[in-house]
Image (cartoon, grey):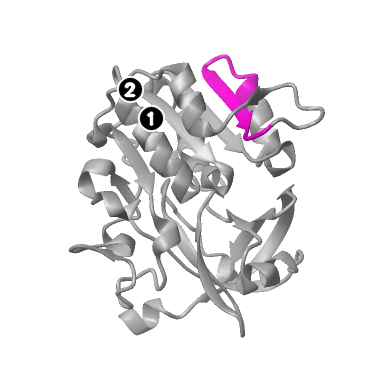
């Protein structure tokens, strides 16, 4: 079974979206018109022949499941090759894998989404799900931080969220930037400034490790308990199916038991 799961399926790039100076999104369609049903928080392994594969969160799926989107930050050799890809090119895809954010268990609660940089990618499906089932959830608050305005992702989505009266959106950049009139400050400082109280809320945090570490510290300082703070650890995975053993945290494998965890489920060093 593991051998079969390690064989990628061919997928065609339907669309390429330049999200920021070093992030592109790719709308992918699996060969033979297979539908994909990815739940919020699940991931896929995407490969380029001759250059290996890497893990990417599914950032959006079409309503009929005919295609799905990943967002790729240009970092290493494989992601540089992906950034050269154009519409019509083929890649390999395995998945979707992993557990998902427990959105059904969150019904009736207020949700706080806290993303930094490319960390907004795995959080976007949560926002999509809540907006598609708006009556099932309480207040929705989104905090998104980027280094500069040039690093802000999903500008079209942010515009929609900003104009939605049911959403409180806070967009911030790390340092002052010419022409930027919005909020300035790193995400953990914004969390403290907003004095986010736990109440009946659930918080979901994703971003660079240092941002997660200090954001979690800020939430704990505001009396949030670890069982109400969630994150995703897909960036720490390799094979995606628990065979390589490189993503274990104690007795857990991130790819098999995660990548989504509440903080009370994982050791502190896992963040």
Quadrant of the rendering where the N terminus is positioned: bottom left
Q: As drawn, is 93 to the left or to the right of 108? A: right
Where residue 260 sits in the image (x, y, percent)? 34, 49
From the image, tell me which residue sits under label 1: 218
Q: Is residue 154 above or below residue 6?
A: above
Which of the labelled discs sits on residue 172, or is there none? none
Cβ atoms at labels 2 and 1 below 8 Å apart: yes
- Report the Cα–Cα distance between label 2 and label 1: 6 Å
- Label tally: 2
Q: Is residue 166 magenta?
A: yes
In the image shown, does 59 or 104 lie closer to the viewer?
59
Residue located at (34% from left, 40% from top)? 230
Q: Which element is circle 1 on? A: helix
Q: Badge 1 local density, few (<14 within 10 Å), some, or many (20+)?
A: many
Where residue 201 sits in the image (x, y, percent)? 33, 23
Where residue 26 sits in the image (x, y, percent)? 66, 57
Q: Residue most toward the right?
A: 179
Q: Which element is circle 2 on? A: loop
Which of the labelled discs sits on residue 222, or is there none? 2
Q: Which residues are magenta?
A: 161-175
Q: Residue most toward the front?
A: 175
Q: Residue most toward the top?
A: 165
Q: Badge 2 local density, few (<14 within 10 Å), some, or many (20+)?
A: some
Q: Is residue 256 magenta?
A: no
């Amino acid at each position: 079974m593991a051998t079969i799961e390690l064989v990628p399926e061919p997928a065609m790039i339907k669309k390429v979206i330049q999200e920021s100076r070093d992030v592109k999104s790719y709308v992918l369609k699996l060969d033979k018109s297979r539908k994909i049903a990815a739940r919020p928080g699940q991931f896929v392994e995407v490969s380029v022949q001759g250059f290996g594969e890497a893990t990417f969160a599914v950032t959006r799926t079409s309503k009929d499941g005919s295609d799905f989107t990943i967002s790729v930050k240009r970092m290493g050799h494989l992601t540089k090759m992906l950034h050269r890809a154009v519409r019509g090119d083929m890649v390999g895809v395995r998945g979707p894998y992993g557990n998902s954010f427990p959105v059904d268990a969150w019904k009736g609660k207020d949700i706080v989404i806290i993303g930094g940089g490319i960390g907004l990618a795995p959080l976007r499906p949560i926002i999509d799900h809540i907006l598609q089932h708006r009556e099932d959830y309480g207040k929705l608050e989104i905090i998104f931080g980027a280094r500069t305005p040039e690093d802000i992702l999903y500008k079209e989505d942010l515009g929609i969220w900003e104009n939605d009266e049911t959403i409180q959106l806070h967009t911030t950049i790390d340092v002052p930037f010419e022409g930027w009139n919005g909020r300035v400050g790193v995400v953990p400082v914004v969390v403290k400034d907003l004095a986010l109280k736990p109440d009946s809320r659930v918080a979901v945090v994703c971003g660079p490790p240092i941002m997660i570490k200090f954001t979690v510290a800020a939430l704990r300082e505001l009396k949030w308990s670890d069982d109400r703070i969630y994150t995703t650890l897909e960036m720490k995975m390799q094979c995606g199916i628990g065979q390589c053993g490189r993503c274990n945290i104690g007795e857990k494998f991130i790819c098999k038991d995660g990548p989504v965890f509440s903080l009370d489920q994982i050791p502190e060093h896992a963040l």
